[in-house]
Image (spheres, rainbow, N blue to C red):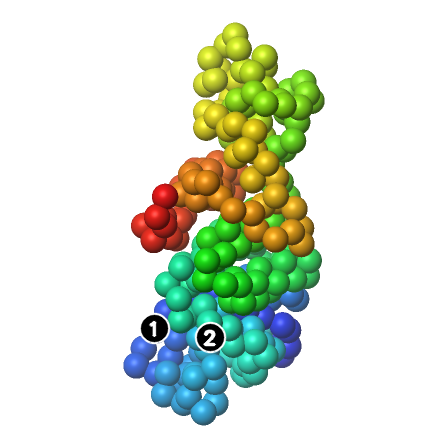
Amino acid sequence: MTLVTTRAVLLRSFPYSETSRVLRFYTDALGCVGVMGKGVRADGARSGSALESFVEGTLTVYMKPTRELQTLCEFAPTRERRMLAGDVRRFGGAAVLAELVMKHAGEEANPGLFEVLSRSLDRLAEVSREAVVATLLGEGWRLVAALGYRPMVEHCVECGAAPGGELALFDLAAGGIRCARCTLGPTREARGGVGPRLGPGARAQLAALLEEGAEPPPLDRPRAHLRLLSDFVTHHISAGRPLPSFAVLAELLDG
């Protein structure tokens, strides 16, 4: 058994008994790791009161490779992000990011992905309430890109041409847009993946959401943008199964 200390974000927790919880962390040294927090529900002074969803801190665990759940030694919070719990849209957006990481990241160290997740949760906690949805979409796409699935939205995935002012098909299987010329002929199903048609305005908004460090743009149809992100994640990351957190968040959007 080895004692390991690493930066960690708590993605989810479940009651296990009257005194213990099962904790799912994403860490910079261990990737996703399941941890048994014995006694944390009864001993808030030790660590239980600090173990709220999306809190970030320094995690120390007893590691045993043959064990599915590792044993919590200590967790010292450094970023509590209580603003996420104070707004249902912020919390719903953070749940989307957490579920996305849990579905794909695995148990291998990826410090770069950890940094993207950490910054994304910070931005979601700090932006104005009016900018929460656009911020979540931007951070969601950047997290998808960090996982290796950045879509092509500026040029056609088949011929490389820029669609200009035309409608373009977002081909989910191909991972980007097809211009009108490359969409003609065989059916869309024969070309590998059905998706929505996007005009120049929607494509410009999507490109802005993907741009690192950019302010989130005003969105004409936030629900449609969320559906596109959800469909893309379903196709490329979650093995054909929609993530439940997307459906929950969609119910909170106006249009």
- x and y percent of residue 65 in the render? 57, 66
Choose the circle earlier in sequence order: 1 or 2.
Answer: 1
Residue at 52% in and 27% down:
199
The answer to whether any part of residue 11 appears in the image is: yes
Task: Give the structural element (helix, strand or loop) at label 2.
Answer: helix
In the rendered view, would you say 208 is above or below 160? Answer: below
Q: Position of residue 203 (x, y in %)?
A: 56, 33
Instruction: Tell which residue pokes out farthest to the top in this image.
Output: 185
User: Vertical placement of 156 versus 210: above or below?
Assistant: above
Asked whether the viewer can see residue 143, the reply is no
Looking at the rendered structure, the kind of residue marked 1 is Pro
Q: 91 or 97, which lies in front?
A: 91
Is residue 150 placed above or below 31 in the rendered structure?
above
Check residue 15 in the rendering and tell me which mark sits there, or answer none.
1
Residue annotated with mark 2:
82
**Which of the 4 image quarters holds residue 160?**
top right
Image point 37% across, 83% down: which residue? 41
Q: Nearer the viewer, mark 1 or mark 2?
A: 2
Residue 211 position within the rendered picture, expressed as x and y whole percent measured from the top left: 65, 46
The disc at residue 145 is none
- The furthest residue to the bottom: 45
| Left or right: 115, with 62 as reference point | right
- Residue at the spot 52% in from the left edge and 7% down from the top edge: 185
**Label 2 Cα crowd, 10 Å radius (few <14 / some 14-19 / many 20+):** some
- Which one is nearer the viewer's eye here, 226 or 69? 226
The N terminus is located in which quarter?
A: bottom right
- Three-letter amino acid code at disc 2? Arg
How far apart, in angstroms, are the residues tagged by discs 1 and 2? 21 Å
Disc 1 element:
strand
Name the quarter where the C terminus is drawn. Answer: top left
x, y percentage for residue 231?
Answer: 45, 38
Residue at the image point whose x is 41% and y is 70% from the top = 85
